[in-house]
Image (cartoon, rainbow, N blue to C red):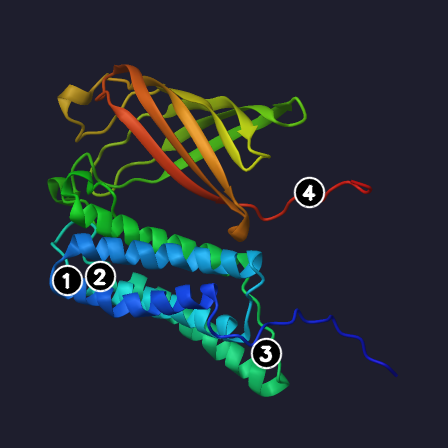
Amino acid sequence: MTSHSEPRTPHSQRVWTVANLLTFLRMALIPVFAIMLVYHNEGWALIVFTIAGVSDGIDGFIARRMKQESELGTIIDPIADKLLMTTAFVMLTIPSMLPQGRHLPVPFWVTACVIGRDIAIIAVAGAINMMTGFRGFKPSWLGKASTFVQVSAVILILVAAVYPLINGIYLPTDRSPLAGGQGVSSGQVTHEFSGGGSLYFKDRTTFLTALASYQLNMRQRGIDVTRGDSIQIEGGVGTKLFGQLAEAGLAGFAFWQVRDDRGADLPPVLRGARDRVYGLGPEAAILLKAIHGQVRVRYEWDIGARARPQGHIFVAGLNFFLASRGKPAGS
């Protein structure tokens, strides 16, 4: 009986490749990053970490494009990633590393989850190797997505530390300091019912999207206040660019509060005041093939606000594709 197995992609035995040099650079920047934080040079820490994080994506791209995939690279690249992220989260969890803020220090449970995940992966991979001798572990798109999210989170935390005026970027992991967490800003449960869809035109390069939702708000925590229900309609029109690697278009929304706020503790100024606002602005997205995902950003100006402050809205999102349609036969 003859056994068949999938052929493995041969890897080079070379050490000094451009991809490996970038990985070595990333490992060398880890202590530099830690030193910058210890001596409170947050700006330089941000620059060093950003260079290290970007190099993580560049070295893999160069290895594939220049055919520089090597046995050494498959070993040291994930090690460099884990060392970088472990160092970053541990340092940001120490209270004295950065100025205190709503987002700092990073909660211990976040760091524990990051490190615990890596330990679990190493333990499972080691057990499989010991029991079966299998060593052909390949990075998955979920792993790449996890690294991308972690690197992005650390960069945003450092940006908020370096530029306090935009420290609205934070991890919502604690109680609101407003009114001791017991005022009209306290938390609530909201049930949302929504539906929508997309229409594509001209060989799926031009599209129209729409989403309508109804928010049913429950009583707020620790106070007899219930926000009125609301309806929101959002959507946009756009087109795909550069062989569907990017999207650009115009987005908008309309928000109406359809039921009054109520409750014995509701301030008189809020009684009978129903929110209403419209918004309009540009939207863009970039496809990230390496992680089977898409980064989408939107900036909208409030128009016609009533019973609420009027301002601007910036939204950034990361989407992951769980499945995609294959190419038709013969294409």
Q: For the residues marked 3 and 2, what is the alpha-carbon distance in whole angstroms?
A: 34 Å
Type of amino acid at the residue the image marks with label 2: Leu
Give the image location of residue 254, x and y in percent.
39, 19
Looking at the image, is mark 3 or mark 2 nearer the viewer? 3
The label on residue 325 is: 4
Give the image location of residue 115, x and y in percent.
35, 69
Q: Earlier in the sequence, mark 3 or mark 2?
A: 2
The label on residue 97 is: 1
Q: For the residues marked 2 and 1, what is the alpha-carbon distance in whole angstroms?
A: 6 Å
Q: Quadrant of the C terminus?
A: top right
Give the image location of residue 13, x and y in percent.
56, 77
Left or right, 152 with respect to 220, comes to right
Circle 4 SS class: loop
Q: For the residues marked 1 and 3, what is the alpha-carbon distance in whole angstroms?
A: 39 Å
Q: Earlier in the sequence, mark 1 or mark 3?
A: 1
Circle 2 SS class: helix
The residue located at (45%, 68%) in the rendering is 20
Type of amino acid at the residue the image marks with label 1: Met
> How would you rate the neighbour count of disc 4 (Cα within 10 Å): few for under 14, some for 14-19, many for 20 or more?
few
Q: For the residues marked 4 and 3, what is the alpha-carbon distance in whole angstroms?
A: 31 Å
Q: Earlier in the sequence, mark 4 or mark 3?
A: 3
Type of amino acid at the residue the image marks with label 4: Arg
